[in-house]
């Protein structure tokens, strides 16, 4: 009799990890199932009960194949870890899963939910063709292998600055969710450039890894003439404070005196919520590599809108060539046609329909003698909703059909006034994906962690994103002319999306 069930998507994920990720297509599936379990246990909220049961196209597994219950060690890695797994799940869920038939049934249900949620997390944050071992390091081990940073760093910072020829004083420190901001007063204003050039050396002096860069902010806004600087020094991951999805709901529902398309991507480095108006952007690029938190950032932007706006105020066109990330939004009444567009042909048709809608709205604005949709809505002359178009993986869309670029460019050039706004996301920030025409017409940018300074420049027109910490750490410039700000993303999960959906189904959460 089977203990654990998967569905067809889960099985495809297992096969892809074995074949393209681990390069061991004939290895036992238990390797992937255990990785999925470990990934799920890192998420602080319990998995949903929708992950129970079996489905057509899935597989069945006995405990012996997953936890090694009753097995002795052999060459395929089978070993009895069942007591250890039961203990972890008992601690995680705060209940006894050792005694009695009911606790045993509860253990198997929770184990299935965690494994299936872990598989979902893998397929939404990793894709075949990308480095799976790097993905695992980032998701599971990076925090454990990072050299801890001591909390009292003022003297070490002074000593490190002295090594690069800078004389300075520390005049304050503030601790945020992930970083500590040290306010540094330079004895010589001409030392600004030395600090900027020596940040990597200063990071090494403080024991930071090359991926954990110190970011520099000018406290008084005078650039190279600045005498007071802010050094954002990352803390070890075990000291981070996660921003739960429930906070997003609070911000979106409690703040009424904000523009219609206001979104909350997360909090600033000191923990205060950050928001901006998508309509003022007026279009946005979100870029970051695998594991950077790009998809979670998209969820935060979408839920910011969905918690506040009815279908009469908002329509969403969701394009997801990856076929995994946005599917949960199909039931929302704001989603055009009640479906997420996954086929490239359908995406081209939808984009052309939006171009036609843009022209129709332009004519309507002219007839009503208003400058834009916001003015028409405020005067009661036009009752059309705003339209937000989200493309989850721009690179995939353009790779499958370069024809998609033409309607995207037309929309970015002309759609702002009529209330149509684009959010384009990619995990491959390069000049081919984000061409010059798109770049010049999409001024709003969110950069999550990337591999190189060149990728950072593609997104932000400046370096810095290559030094971010991953897991939702981002640099934010929501509109042209605005300064770049650092933020930490909200941890949005499937449960947060389902909770928001209850608002439109009329049920109690």
Image (cartoon, grey):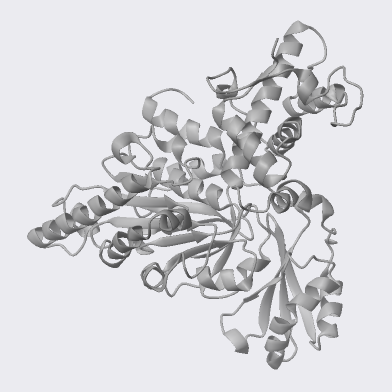
148 lies left or right of 223: right
User: In the image shown, does 76 or 48 lie closer to the viewer?
Assistant: 76
- Please state the horizontal and vertical placement of residue 493, each as a whole percent of the image: 57, 38
Q: Quadrant of residue 178?
A: bottom right
- Please state the horizontal and vertical placement of residue 163, each as a whole percent of the image: 85, 84
340 lies left or right of 213: left
Q: Quadrant of residue 171?
A: bottom right
Vertical side of 368 occupied by 63: above or below = above
User: Is residue 404 at all visible to an observer of this figure?
Assistant: yes
User: In the image shown, does 33 or 462 lie closer to the viewer?
Assistant: 33
User: In the image shown, does 282 or 57 lie closer to the viewer?
Assistant: 57
- Please state the horizontal and vertical placement of residue 53, each as a whole percent of the image: 58, 17
Count the numbered circles shown. Answer: 0
Single out the residue that lies furthest toward the front: 26
Which of the image's four quarters has the N terminus? top right
User: Is residue 378 at all visible to an observer of this figure?
Assistant: no
- Please state the horizontal and vertical placement of residue 480, each as a whole percent of the image: 42, 72
Single out the residue that lies furthest toward the left: 367
Vertical side of 327 occupied by 74: above or below = above
**Residue occupying the point 38% across, 40% down:** 340
């Amino acid at each position: 009799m089977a203990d654990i069930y998967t569905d067809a998507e889960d099985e495809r994920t297992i096969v892809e990890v074995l074949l393209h990720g681990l390069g061991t297509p004939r290895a036992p599936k238990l390797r992937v199932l255990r990785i999925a379990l470990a990934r799920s246990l890192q998420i602080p909220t319990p998995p949903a009960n929708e992950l129970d049961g079996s489905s057509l196209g899935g597989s069945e597994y006995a405990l012996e194949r997953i936890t090694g219950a009753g097995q002795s060690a052999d060459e395929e890695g089978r070993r009895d870890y069942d007591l250890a797994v039961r203990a972890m799940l008992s601690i995680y869920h705060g209940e006894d899963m050792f005694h009695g038939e009911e606790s045993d049934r509860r253990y198997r249900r929770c184990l299935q939910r965690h494994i299936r949620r872990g598989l979902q997390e893998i397929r939404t944050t990793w894709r075949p063709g990308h480095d799976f071992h790097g993905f695992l390091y980032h998701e599971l081990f990076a925090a454990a292998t990072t050299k801890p940073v001591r909390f009292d760093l003022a003297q070490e910072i002074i000593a490190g600055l002295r090594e690069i020829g800078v004389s300075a004083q520390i005049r304050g420190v503030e601790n945020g969710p992930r970083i500590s901001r040290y306010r540094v007063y330079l004895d010589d204003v001409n030392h600004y450039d030395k600090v900027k050039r020596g940040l990597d050396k200063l990071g090494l002096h403080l024991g930071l890894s090359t991926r954990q860069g110190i970011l520099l902010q000018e406290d008084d806004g005078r650039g190279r003439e600045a005498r007071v600087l802010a050094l954002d020094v990352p803390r070890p991951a075990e000291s981070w404070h996660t921003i739960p999805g429930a906070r997003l709901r609070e911000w979106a529902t409690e703040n009424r005196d904000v523009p219609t398309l206001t979104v909350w991507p997360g909090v600033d480095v000191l923990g205060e919520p950050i928001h901006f108006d998508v309509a003022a952007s007026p279009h946005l690029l979100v870029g970051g590599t695998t594991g950077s938190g790009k998809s979670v950032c998209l969820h935060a932007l979408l839920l910011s809108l969905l918690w506040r706006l009815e279908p009469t105020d908002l329509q969403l066109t969701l394009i997801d060539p990856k076929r995994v990330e946005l599917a949960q939004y199909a039931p929302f009444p704001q989603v055009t046609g009640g479906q997420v567009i996954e086929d490239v042909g359908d995406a081209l048709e939808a984009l052309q329909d939006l171009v036609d809608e843009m022209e129709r709205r332009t004519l309507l604005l002219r007839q009503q003698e208003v400058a834009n949709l916001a003015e028409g809505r405020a005067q009661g002359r036009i009752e059309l909703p705003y339209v937000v178009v989200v493309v989850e993986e721009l690179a995939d869309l353009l790779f499958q059909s370069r024809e998609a670029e033409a309607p995207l460019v037309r929309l970015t050039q002309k759609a702002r006034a009529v209330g149509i706004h684009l959010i384009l996301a990619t995990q491959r920030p390069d000049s081919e994906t984000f061409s010059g025409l798109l770049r010049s017409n999409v001024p709003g940018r969110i950069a999550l962690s990337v591999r190189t300074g060149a990728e950072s420049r593609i997104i932000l027109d400046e370096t810095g994103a290559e030094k971010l910490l991953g897991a939702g750490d981002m640099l934010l410039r929501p509109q042209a002319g605005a300064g770049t700000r650092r933020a930490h993303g909200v941890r949005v999960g499937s449960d947060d999306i389902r909770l928001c959906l209850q608002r439109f189904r009329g049920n109690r959460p």
